Amino acid sequence: MMDENKQIAYFAGGCFWGVEYYFSQKPGVISTEAGYMGGDIQSPCYEEVKTGKTGHLEVVKVVFNPKEIDYMELAKLFFEIHDPTQTDGQGVDIGTQYLSAIFYLDEAQKCIAQKLIDQLRQKGLDVVTKLIDAAGYTFWVAENYHQQYFSKLNQAPTCHIPVKRF
């Protein structure tokens, strides 16, 4: 779904609850959805993914209106709401399912993400975020209880604390 009014981005920045919360707050974001990408099995469930054995990452699908917010702004937010230098997960969430990655849909998204990684590296950050071609993977929607988790609780995330990097 890529057109002049709707585009998609996929971000994996640790626990998807906090990542989804921050993206859902941005004007121009039409919808967010927690899910899984990158693994070996079809239609994984949380109980499988949380073991770290399926190869899936916790991912947030962001549908946005590019006339209101561009991919660059979304990607900058991504790098500011998680630690792109942590190699083994995010915060206390340790495991391959919590790694930092961007699943890009086209060369433009890949170039923007790489440009931001290069900027952060020039600032002295050892960024480990992986750039992965989304074409080879299906986005599997996570269970309903994971969707808009912090909004349902009427709370802000404790698993992601924004840090100004740009």
Image (spheres, rainbow, N blue to C red):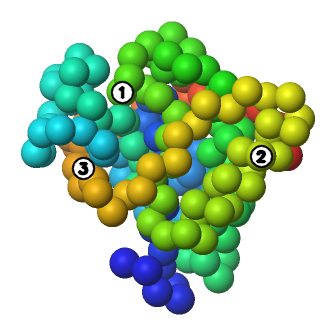
Question: Is 139 displayed left or right of 113 in the figure?
Answer: left
Please tell me the numbered disc located at residue 78: none
**Disc 3 to disc 1, C-alpha distance:** 15 Å
Amino acid carrying label 3: it is Val
Residue for point 74% across, 55% down: 115
Residue for point 30% across, 43% down: 38
Question: Is 15 displayed left or right of 54 in the figure?
Answer: right
| 125 in relation to 92, above or below | below
**Residue position marked by numbered label 3 in the rendering:** 141
Amino acid carrying label 2: it is Asp
Residue farthest bottom in this picture: 4
Amino acid carrying label 1: it is Gln
| 93 in relation to 54, above or below | above
**Disc 1 to disc 2, C-alpha distance:** 24 Å
**Residue position marked by numbered label 2 in the rendering:** 118
Q: Earlier in the sequence, mark 3 or mark 2?
A: 2
Residue for point 52% across, 34% down: 100
Residue 91 image offset from top left, x and y in percent:
56, 15
Residue 19 image offset from top left, x and y in percent:
52, 40
**Residue position marked by numbered label 1 in the rendering:** 97
Disc 2 secondary structure class: helix
Q: Are marks 1 and 2 in contact (CB under 8 Å)?
A: no
